[in-house]
Image (cartoon, grey):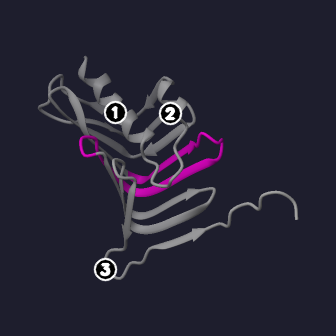
Protein backbone atom coordinates (compact mmCIF):
# COMPACT_ATOMS: atom_id res chain seq x y z
CA UNK A 1 0.00 0.00 0.00
CA UNK A 2 3.04 2.25 0.02
CA UNK A 3 2.94 2.60 -3.77
CA UNK A 4 -0.36 4.44 -4.11
CA UNK A 5 0.57 7.30 -1.78
CA UNK A 6 3.89 7.68 -3.62
CA UNK A 7 1.99 7.81 -6.91
CA UNK A 8 -0.30 10.43 -5.51
CA UNK A 9 2.73 12.38 -4.33
CA UNK A 10 3.88 12.38 -7.93
CA UNK A 11 0.48 13.63 -9.03
CA UNK A 12 0.74 16.37 -6.41
CA UNK A 13 4.05 17.42 -7.91
CA UNK A 14 2.45 17.42 -11.34
CA UNK A 15 -0.42 19.61 -10.40
CA UNK A 16 1.57 21.99 -8.23
CA UNK A 17 4.03 22.56 -11.04
CA UNK A 18 1.75 23.05 -14.03
CA UNK A 19 2.18 26.81 -14.24
CA UNK A 20 3.73 27.73 -17.58
CA UNK A 21 3.45 31.48 -17.01
CA UNK A 22 6.02 33.47 -14.99
CA UNK A 23 3.88 33.55 -11.84
CA UNK A 24 4.08 30.74 -9.30
CA UNK A 25 1.12 28.74 -8.05
CA UNK A 26 0.14 29.12 -4.43
CA UNK A 27 3.13 27.58 -2.67
CA UNK A 28 1.16 26.79 0.50
CA UNK A 29 -1.04 24.34 -1.45
CA UNK A 30 1.77 21.77 -1.40
CA UNK A 31 1.43 21.60 2.41
CA UNK A 32 -2.32 20.92 2.29
CA UNK A 33 -3.94 17.47 2.26
CA UNK A 34 -4.80 16.12 -1.17
CA UNK A 35 -8.30 14.77 -1.81
CA UNK A 36 -8.93 12.47 -4.76
CA UNK A 37 -12.33 11.38 -6.01
CA UNK A 38 -12.49 8.88 -8.89
CA UNK A 39 -14.94 6.30 -10.12
CA UNK A 40 -12.24 3.62 -10.19
CA UNK A 41 -8.60 3.04 -9.25
CA UNK A 42 -6.29 0.30 -10.48
CA UNK A 43 -2.72 -0.10 -9.17
CA UNK A 44 -0.14 -2.71 -8.31
CA UNK A 45 2.03 -2.79 -5.22
CA UNK A 46 5.17 -2.69 -7.36
CA UNK A 47 6.34 -0.87 -10.50
CA UNK A 48 4.98 -3.51 -12.89
CA UNK A 49 2.02 -1.37 -13.98
CA UNK A 50 1.08 2.29 -13.74
CA UNK A 51 -1.54 3.50 -11.28
CA UNK A 52 -4.70 4.44 -13.19
CA UNK A 53 -7.48 6.58 -11.75
CA UNK A 54 -10.56 6.82 -13.98
CA UNK A 55 -14.29 7.48 -14.11
CA UNK A 56 -14.16 11.24 -13.66
CA UNK A 57 -11.11 12.18 -11.58
CA UNK A 58 -11.32 15.17 -9.22
CA UNK A 59 -8.18 16.18 -7.36
CA UNK A 60 -8.15 19.04 -4.86
CA UNK A 61 -5.34 20.36 -2.69
CA UNK A 62 -5.67 23.78 -1.11
CA UNK A 63 -6.73 26.14 -3.91
CA UNK A 64 -5.79 23.59 -6.57
CA UNK A 65 -8.67 21.91 -8.43
CA UNK A 66 -8.01 19.40 -11.24
CA UNK A 67 -10.66 17.57 -13.25
CA UNK A 68 -9.94 14.90 -15.85
CA UNK A 69 -11.33 11.64 -17.16
CA UNK A 70 -8.22 9.67 -16.21
CA UNK A 71 -4.92 10.07 -14.40
CA UNK A 72 -2.11 7.58 -15.09
CA UNK A 73 1.00 7.61 -12.88
CA UNK A 74 4.09 5.56 -13.80
CA UNK A 75 6.74 4.63 -11.23
CA UNK A 76 10.33 3.38 -11.28
CA UNK A 77 12.02 2.15 -8.15
CA UNK A 78 8.94 3.09 -6.09
CA UNK A 79 9.13 6.74 -7.18
CA UNK A 80 6.71 8.45 -9.55
CA UNK A 81 8.40 9.40 -12.85
CA UNK A 82 5.50 10.36 -15.13
CA UNK A 83 1.90 11.45 -14.75
CA UNK A 84 -0.56 11.74 -17.64
CA UNK A 85 -3.97 13.40 -17.26
CA UNK A 86 -6.42 12.93 -20.13
CA UNK A 87 -9.93 13.55 -21.31
CA UNK A 88 -12.96 15.50 -20.68
CA UNK A 89 -10.84 17.87 -21.25
CA UNK A 90 -8.34 18.24 -18.40
CA UNK A 91 -9.16 21.38 -16.37
CA UNK A 92 -6.84 22.88 -13.80
CA UNK A 93 -7.58 25.89 -11.58
CA UNK A 94 -5.45 27.37 -8.81
CA UNK A 95 -4.78 30.64 -7.06
CA UNK A 96 -1.36 32.22 -7.44
CA UNK A 97 0.53 33.37 -4.34
CA UNK A 98 -0.79 36.86 -5.12
CA UNK A 99 -4.38 35.54 -4.83
CA UNK A 100 -4.98 35.97 -8.55
CA UNK A 101 -6.58 33.09 -10.48
CA UNK A 102 -4.75 30.75 -12.86
CA UNK A 103 -6.38 28.15 -15.12
CA UNK A 104 -5.37 25.71 -17.83
CA UNK A 105 -7.45 23.51 -20.13
CA UNK A 106 -6.06 20.85 -22.50
CA UNK A 107 -7.03 17.49 -23.91
CA UNK A 108 -3.90 15.96 -22.35
CA UNK A 109 -1.31 16.97 -19.76
CA UNK A 110 1.86 14.86 -19.66
CA UNK A 111 4.39 15.53 -16.89
CA UNK A 112 7.87 14.00 -16.90
CA UNK A 113 8.82 14.30 -13.23
CA UNK A 114 12.50 13.38 -13.75
CA UNK A 115 13.02 15.78 -16.64
CA UNK A 116 10.71 18.36 -15.05
CA UNK A 117 8.90 19.00 -18.33
CA UNK A 118 5.13 19.45 -18.66
CA UNK A 119 3.49 19.07 -22.08
CA UNK A 120 -0.06 20.34 -22.66
CA UNK A 121 -1.62 19.10 -25.92
CA UNK A 122 -4.93 19.49 -27.72
CA UNK A 123 -6.88 22.75 -27.65
CA UNK A 124 -4.69 24.28 -24.95
CA UNK A 125 -5.86 27.43 -23.18
CA UNK A 126 -3.83 28.88 -20.33
CA UNK A 127 -5.13 31.96 -18.52
CA UNK A 128 -3.62 34.10 -15.81
CA UNK A 129 -4.21 37.76 -14.90
CA UNK A 130 -1.67 39.21 -17.32
CA UNK A 131 -2.80 37.23 -20.34
CA UNK A 132 -3.76 34.09 -22.19
CA UNK A 133 -2.00 31.52 -24.35
CA UNK A 134 -3.83 29.27 -26.83
CA UNK A 135 -2.44 26.59 -29.11
CA UNK A 136 -2.32 22.89 -29.85
CA UNK A 137 0.86 22.22 -27.87
CA UNK A 138 2.59 24.03 -25.00
CA UNK A 139 5.79 22.69 -23.42
CA UNK A 140 7.03 24.06 -20.10
CA UNK A 141 10.53 23.19 -18.90
CA UNK A 142 10.50 23.87 -15.15
CA UNK A 143 14.30 23.68 -14.86
CA UNK A 144 14.87 26.46 -17.38
CA UNK A 145 11.47 28.26 -17.14
CA UNK A 146 11.33 27.99 -20.95
CA UNK A 147 7.87 27.88 -22.57
CA UNK A 148 7.62 26.60 -26.14
CA UNK A 149 4.31 26.56 -27.98
CA UNK A 150 3.14 25.78 -31.47
CA UNK A 151 0.30 24.49 -33.50
CA UNK A 152 0.17 21.17 -35.26
CA UNK A 153 -0.27 21.33 -39.02
CA UNK A 154 -1.66 24.76 -39.85
CA UNK A 155 -2.30 25.52 -36.18
CA UNK A 156 -1.27 28.84 -34.73
CA UNK A 157 -0.27 30.10 -31.30
CA UNK A 158 -2.36 32.98 -30.00
CA UNK A 159 -1.41 35.17 -27.06
CA UNK A 160 -2.97 38.18 -25.40
CA UNK A 161 -0.89 40.16 -22.94
CA UNK A 162 -2.63 42.75 -20.82
CA UNK A 163 -0.88 46.06 -20.12
CA UNK A 164 0.64 46.55 -16.69
CA UNK A 165 -1.62 48.38 -14.26
CA UNK A 166 -0.54 52.04 -14.15
CA UNK A 167 1.44 52.92 -11.01
CA UNK A 168 0.38 55.98 -9.03
CA UNK A 169 -2.17 58.56 -10.09
CA UNK A 170 -2.33 60.46 -13.22
Give the residue pinned by disc 2.
60
Tell me the crowding category of disc 3: few under 14, some 14 to 19, or many 20 or more residues within 10 angstroms, Cα based.
few
Principal SS element in the magenta part? strand
Farthest left residue? 48
Left or right, residue 24 beside residue 71:
right
Q: Is residue 34 above or below residue 53?
A: above
Q: Residue at x 62, y 48 (%)?
A: 101
Image quarter of residue 108: bottom left
Give the residue pinned by disc 1.
40
**How far across and how far down the image is residue 137, in percent?**
36, 65
Residue closer to the observer: 39 or 157: 157
Q: How far apart are the alpha carbons under marks 3 and 1?
A: 36 Å
| Label 3 secondary element | loop
**How far across and how far down the image is residue 38, in percent?**
40, 34
Q: Residue at x 22, y 29 (%)?
A: 79
| Label 1 secondary element | strand
Residue 56 in sight from this viewpoint: no
Task: Please report whichever mark, 2 or 1, sits nearer to the chain's N-terminal start.
Answer: 1
Amino acid sequence: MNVLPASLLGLTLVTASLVPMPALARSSDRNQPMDIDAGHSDYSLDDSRPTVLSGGVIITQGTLDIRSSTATITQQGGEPVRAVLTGGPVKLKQQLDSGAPFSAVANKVDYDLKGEVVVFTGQVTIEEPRGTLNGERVVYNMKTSQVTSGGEGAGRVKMRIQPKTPQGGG
